[in-house]
């Protein structure tokens, strides 16, 4: 009965969902494309072999896609005859799949969770296993996969207190979904307990840690004759504000202005999360009277540059490698923080704001070992930055602690592979 009301609600909401796509397409035209995939009408690629075993991984956007990368790559190595379908919901997630995997996996937008739509897609795809990354639980997707005998894994699973309270309000629906999930690989004991309290079978839940600890940080050199080399070799203290969100850059620039008073040579690498905001952020810096360079327009940083706007995609590790201190965005505004593990793995001291629900367990672990500091606002950010800028030893201690923690928590991938192996039996 509850799924009936869910379907009615979804069908009634469909015009608003389509309207949101059109609205988003004003800035990102790709949202006007590939609608047949969103409604389960697009045929599978010509080389898709229905006779082969298929693993379906759903990663809603960039963060989940990044978490799925080590798993998908290991699956390709361990099961070379298995074909992998990765679905996403967002354009940026789709772009990351294409950039990271090329043609080595199949990719589609996940169809909307409407009964007829998702049932058609599942029958056509006929997966042996569905791996839902993090907390992507859709009632019809789970119901029809379970009905068709597909093994369902909730991988890298996390459930914040806030999300748990939300799911508890629809306990009949959430409990039914969790009961149909065969394996839940929880990031932490607290996540595991919340899933059980919502109705998951305790025997189906295991604490594996976070796949995001399996960050691949190679020893690649910075691109020659690039702005990154120029920044790194400048002998200036370099702060990166990474994956910042709307409303956050203004706070960061306030903190940066305070730091300039004691360290006039400080350089800021400001890297917005969404490409459609690159121009807006560059204008904001100029309106503040700062001397701005853009990655897309300049190969080397001038001595007079105060802010470099990172208006490029797929180069985040290069930005981090060029910096001495990392602030990770999405945390001074209430969007739950972005991935703090990349800078930690590179040995950078990490600073975040109070909004951390996407990485709560990881932020807590990093903070416990002294690798990360939480600041309440832009004023605390300025105060702590000023301390770090003047204390190189403190920066090195924080960076070393974070790097060590990441290296010590590399067990999530082998544990997850064990679960997939059990599901494929």
Image (cartoon, rainbow, N blue to C red):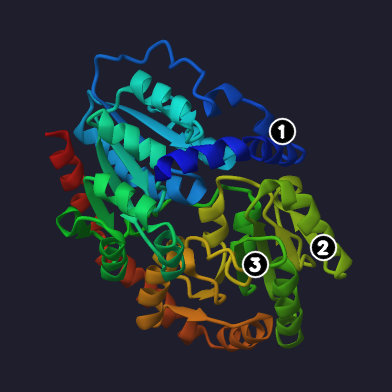
In the depicted structure, whether residue 295 falls above or below residue 235: above
Residue 32 visible in the picture:
yes
Secondary structure state at the residue bearing disc 2: helix
Question: Is tag 1's residue or tag 3's residue first in the polypeptide sequence?
Answer: 1
Q: Residue at x 69, y 50 (%)?
A: 311
Nearer to the camera, 421 or 294: 421
- Name the residue rendered at 40%, 47% in the picture: 137
Q: Gap in Å between the C-alphas at discs 3 and 2? A: 25 Å
Q: Residues within 10 Å of mark 2 (few under 14, many from 20)?
A: some
Tell us which disc is closer to us: 2 or 1: 1
Give left or right: position of 46 versus 317.
left
Whole-number angstrom distance, CA of label 2 to CA of label 1: 24 Å
Q: Could you say whether the residue bearing mark 3 is in a helix, strand or loop? A: loop
Say whether marks 2 and 1 touch (CB < 8 Å): no
Between 328 and 65, which is closer to the camera in this rendering?
A: 65
* Tags 1 and 3 touching, CB below 8 Å: no
Q: Which residue is mark 1?
A: 29
């Amino acid at each position: 009965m509850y799924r009936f009301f869910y379907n009615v609600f979804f069908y009634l909401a469909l015009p608003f969902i389509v309207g949101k796509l059109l609205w988003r397409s004003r800035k990102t035209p790709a949202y006007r494309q590939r609608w047949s995939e969103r409604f389960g009408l697009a045929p599978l690629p010509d080389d898709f072999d229905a006779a082969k075993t298929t693993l379906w991984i759903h990663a809603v956007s960039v963060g989940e896609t990044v978490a799925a990368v080590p798993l998908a790559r290991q699956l390709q190595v361990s099961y070379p005859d298995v074909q992998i379908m990765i679905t996403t919901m967002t354009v940026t997630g789709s772009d990351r799949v294409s950039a990271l995997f090329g043609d080595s996996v199949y990719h589609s937008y996940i169809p909307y969770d409407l009964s007829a739509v998702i049932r058609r897609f599942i029958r056509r795809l006929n997966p042996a296993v569905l791996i839902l990354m993090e907390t992507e639980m859709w009632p019809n997707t789970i119901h029809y996969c379970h009905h068709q005998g597909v093994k369902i894994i909730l991988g890298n699973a996390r459930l914040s207190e806030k999300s748990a309270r939300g799911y508890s309000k629809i306990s009949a629906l959430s409990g039914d979904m969790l009961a149909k999930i065969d394996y839940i690989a929880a990031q932490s004991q607290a996540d595991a307990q919340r899933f059980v309290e919502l109705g998951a079978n305790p025997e189906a839940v295991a604490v594996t840690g976070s796949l995001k600890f399996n960050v691949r940080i190679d020893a690649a050199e910075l691109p020659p004759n690039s702005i990154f080399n120029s920044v790194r070799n400048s002998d200036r203290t370099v702060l990166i504000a990474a994956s910042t969100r709307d409303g956050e850059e203004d706070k960061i620039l306030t903190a940066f202005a305070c730091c300039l008073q004691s360290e006039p040579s400080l350089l800021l690498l400001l890297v917005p999360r969404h490409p459609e905001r690159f121009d807006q952020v560059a204008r904001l810096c100029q309106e503040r009277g700062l001397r701005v360079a853009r990655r897309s327009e300049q190969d080397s940083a001038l001595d007079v540059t105060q802010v470099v706007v990172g208006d490029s995609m797929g180069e985040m590790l290069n930005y981090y490698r060029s910096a001495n201190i990392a602030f990770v965005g999405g945390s001074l505004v209430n969007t739950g923080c972005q991935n703090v593990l990349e800078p930690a793995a590179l040995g950078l001291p990490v600073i975040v704001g109070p909004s951390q629900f996407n990485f709560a367990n990881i932020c807590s672990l990093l903070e416990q070992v002294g690798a990360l500091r939480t600041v309440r606002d832009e004023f605390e950010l300025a105060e702590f930055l000023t301390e770090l800028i003047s204390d190189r030893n403190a920066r090195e201690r924080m960076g070393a602690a974070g790097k060590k923690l990441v290296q010590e928590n590399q067990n999530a991938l082998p544990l997850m592979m064990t679960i997939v192996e059990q599901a494929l039996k």
